[in-house]
Amino acid sequence: MPDIFSVKDQIVLVTGVASGIGYSQAQLFLKRGAVVYGADILRNGQIDSLKEEFPDSFSFFDCDVRKKADLKKVVDQMIQKSGQIDILLNTAGILDSYTPSLETTQEQWDNVLATNLTSMFLLTNLCLPQMLAKDHGVIVNMASIAGLVAGGGGAAYTAAKHGIIGYTKQLDYDYASQGIRANCIAPGAIKTPMNKADFAGEAKMAKEVAAQTPALRWADPREVAALSLFLASKQADYIHGAVVPIDGGWTEK
């Protein structure tokens, strides 16, 4: 039986690959036969395990997504090695400790927006020309429930995630007729290293979040990776400019 969600031999770029959702995306796409390039400011045991398990199909780049020069180096090397980029997963991001506006410094604001939003603009613009040249490219941006409602982050994080949704819609609107398909995912409570503080000690915060979620649990990052795979596959070819929540029902309240 054919794999209807096949990404075999597709050239994929994942940011934030060293942990959490980005790592799970890379692992799943590799298992489905994709050639994956991962970019992150961190290098850890998970990266090493991917290189060991998939020595011929996984490459890692030490990259600060806030720096255009770093991003350009990644894209240039990908094009040199593989000739194209089929799928871009803009996943890298940071939290802001739920800080309200008056307690947010400009430095914090700039850092969160540079990491979570501007990086997507920079990297997408580096990948778009060659995608347009072959009339095909899929982009999946990582937003958040904080891009749909307040309370999922602080002032900077919420602003950045709202920006991702708007950017994704406009991106798809501008280039859909030229073979580009852009969508974004809006995760809720996902158990990743980024949320480890919620699980500290007796995990009081984690339990409170689960209790407030209709599904009564946190999601595993592999669930977000599976949604990413669907959105990147040909089965989702008619899905354009969409925001797909994966939040256990949080935003239905």
Image (cartoon, grey):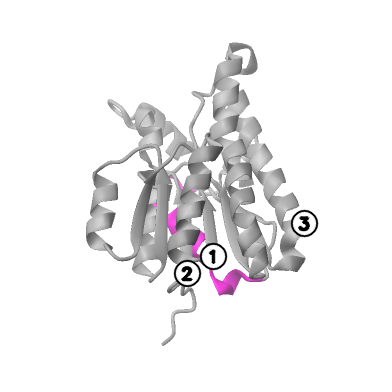
> Would residue 239 be visible to someone looking at this image?
no
Q: CA distance from mark 1 to mark 3?
A: 18 Å
User: Which residue is painted at 65% across and 31% down in the image?
Assistant: 159
- Horizontally, residue 40 falls left or right of residue 159, namely left
Identity of the amino acid at label 1?
Answer: Asp
Q: Secondary structure at mark 1?
A: loop
Residue 86 tag number: 1
Tell me the residue that label 2 is attached to. Answer: 10
- The answer to the question of whether label 2 and label 1 lie on touching residues, with beta carbons closer than 8 A, is yes
Q: Of helix, strand and loop, which one carries label 2? A: loop
Q: Residue at x 64, y 49 (%)?
A: 125
Tell me the quadrant of the picture where the N terminus can be found: bottom left
Task: Report the residue marked by disc 3.
Answer: 174
Looking at the rendering, the stretch of residues picked out in magenta corresponds to: 215-237
For the C terminus, the quadrant is top right
Q: For numbered disc 3, what is the local secondary structure? A: helix
Horizontal and vertical percent position of residue 91: 50, 46
Indicate which disc, 2 or 1, sits on the residue closer to the N terminus.
Answer: 2
